[in-house]
Image (cartoon, rainbow, N blue to C red):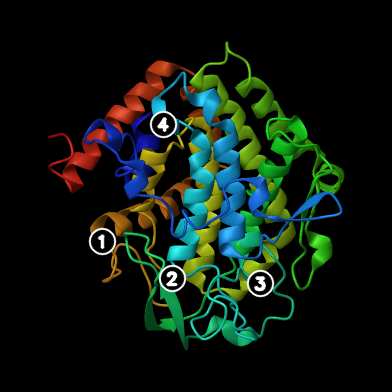
């Protein structure tokens, strides 16, 4: 078992149960522009009896997550107050990490989407992590280093970005996130948990490649029936008084992984346009999610907030090689290396390592041992972690 834990120590050392060491204040750690984002359906415009939402604008997409969290808050009160244990926090927090690290801008630079000189809140349809969308018209020169300006938001999530000049190229992160926004949101609408009927919401299409994206409950059910059923199963069990937190996490991860696989199958070819390190990181990330799912990683606010501090703070460029990236922290370097090692182990064993991992993670004792192991490793990087 320890041979399997070794890469995981690198991946999650700084990420698990930090809340056990400190009091966590949600309001101090909200994603950028959280307070400015819509918090109820009436904050969106309505046409012909339908709420019209533009998911290609950062606050509008963030508002979809915000409404989802608000509407499900009452079901998590039995686990902790103030929505602290709502594991759906992982969705907007991951989206905010993409925004903060500059992964939502137009990588082709044929538009000003996401840039300081244009619409800084625009989400580009050509970004892989945000919607896994088409790069078919993207020039091959994206594989080379090019200078541009991008927004990097400070740790206090202020509305005013710090604009920096950098030498790199951006990565298509937008597309993958779309599937982790539209599908859970629309499935929640269809489940009845949102308090409106299934035909009362319509998402606006992107400026191109519209056929790659579902925009309503009916179209998402038609295009991704299995994944929509898994999200609805989660919401059904969420409303059951007898459901445990651990059981709900299993339903969450089944739906989460299914959503990502839907997006990855459509947009995998787009990784060819990225730098080798960034493309590798994208692939590594897709693999590690299967292991996170098997371990029922708790995607609550405090855990994910700390987890993301260990992720790359910017897009990777040619020449970046963990653990020797000078502008990354030691932990970020180690985690990036750990992700790569885990992917290599998974590939070398034909996913046998994942099968063994799933067997090990079937018992609560193994999960507890895993968390204790990670806490011990974290203490190496942060001696004050355990007090």
> Sequence order check: which comes first, mark 4 or mark 1?
4
Of badges 4 and 1, the one in the foreground is: 4
Using the numbered discs, state the Cα–Cα distance from disc 3 to disc 1 in whole angstroms: 29 Å
Quarter of the image where one finds residue 124:
bottom right
> 10 Å neighbourhood of mark 1: few (<14), some, or many (≥20)?
some
- According to the image, label 4 marks what residue? 82
> Sequence order check: which comes first, mark 3 or mark 1?
3
Using the numbered discs, state the Cα–Cα distance from disc 4 to disc 1 in whole angstroms: 32 Å
- According to the image, label 1 marks what residue? 329
> 10 Å neighbourhood of mark 4: few (<14), some, or many (≥20)?
few
Quarter of the image where one finds residue 370:
top left
- Who's the residue at 69% across and 23% down the image? 236
Q: Whole-percent x and y of residue 271? A: 61, 67
> 10 Å neighbourhood of mark 3: few (<14), some, or many (≥20)?
many
Q: Helix or strand or loop: what does disc 1 sit on?
A: loop
Looking at the image, do the residues carrying marks 1 and 2 touch, with CB atoms under 8 Å apart? no
- Who's the residue at 83% across and 42% down the image? 221
Q: Which mark is residue 316?
A: 2
Q: Which mark is residue 126?
A: 3
- Who's the residue at 74% across and 76% down the image? 136
Q: Which mark is residue 173?
A: none
Q: Which of the two residues, 305 or 47, is positioned nearer the viewer here?
A: 47
From this viewpoint, is residue 157 visible?
yes
Q: Whole-percent x and y of residue 18? A: 28, 37
């Amino acid at each position: 078992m320890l041979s399997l834990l070794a890469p995981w120590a690198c991946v999650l050392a700084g990420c698990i149960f930090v809340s056990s060491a400190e009091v966590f204040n949600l309001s101090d750690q909200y994603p950028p522009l959280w307070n400015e984002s819509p918090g109820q359906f009436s904050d969106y415009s309505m046409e012909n009896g339908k709420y019209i939402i533009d998911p290609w604008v950062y606050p509008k997409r963030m508002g979809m997550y915000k409404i989802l969290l608000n509407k499900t808050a009452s079901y998590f009160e039995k686990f902790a107050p103030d929505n602290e244990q709502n594991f759906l926090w992982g969705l907007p927090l991951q989206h905010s990490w993409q925004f903060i690290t500059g992964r939502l801008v137009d990588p082709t630079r044929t538009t000003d989407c996401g840039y300081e000189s244009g619409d800084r809140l625009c989400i580009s349809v050509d970004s892989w992590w945000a919607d896994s969308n088409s790069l078919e018209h993207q020039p091959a020169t994206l594989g080379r280093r090019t200078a541009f300006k991008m927004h990097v938001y400070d740790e206090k999530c202020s509305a005013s970005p710090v604009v920096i000049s950098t030498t790199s190229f951006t990565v298509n992160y937008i597309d993958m996130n779309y599937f982790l926004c539209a599908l859970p949101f629309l499935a929640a609408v269809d489940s009845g948990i949102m308090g409106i009927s299934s035909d009362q919401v319509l998402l606006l299409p992107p400026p191109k490649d519209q056929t790659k994206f579902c925009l309503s409950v009916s179209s998402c059910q038609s295009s991704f029936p299995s994944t929509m059923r898994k999200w609805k199963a989660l919401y059904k069990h969420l409303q059951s008084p007898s459901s445990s937190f651990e059981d709900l996490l299993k339903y969450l991860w089944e739906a989460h992984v299914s959503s990502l696989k839907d997006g990855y199958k459509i947009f995998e070819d787009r990784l060819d346009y990225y730098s080798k390190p960034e493309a590798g990181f994208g692939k590594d990330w897709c693999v590690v999610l299967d292991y996170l799912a098997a371990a029922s990683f708790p995607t609550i606010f405090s855990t994910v907030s700390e987890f993301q501090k260990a992720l790359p703070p910017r897009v990777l460029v040619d020449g970046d090689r963990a653990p020797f990236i000078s502008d990354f922290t030691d932990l970020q370097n180690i985690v990036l290396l750990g992700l790569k090692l885990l992917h290599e182990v998974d590939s070398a064993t034909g996913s046998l390592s994942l099968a063994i991992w799933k067997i090990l993670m079937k018992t609560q004792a193994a999960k507890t041992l895993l968390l204790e192991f990670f806490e011990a490793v974290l203490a190496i990087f942060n001696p004050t972690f355990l007090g």
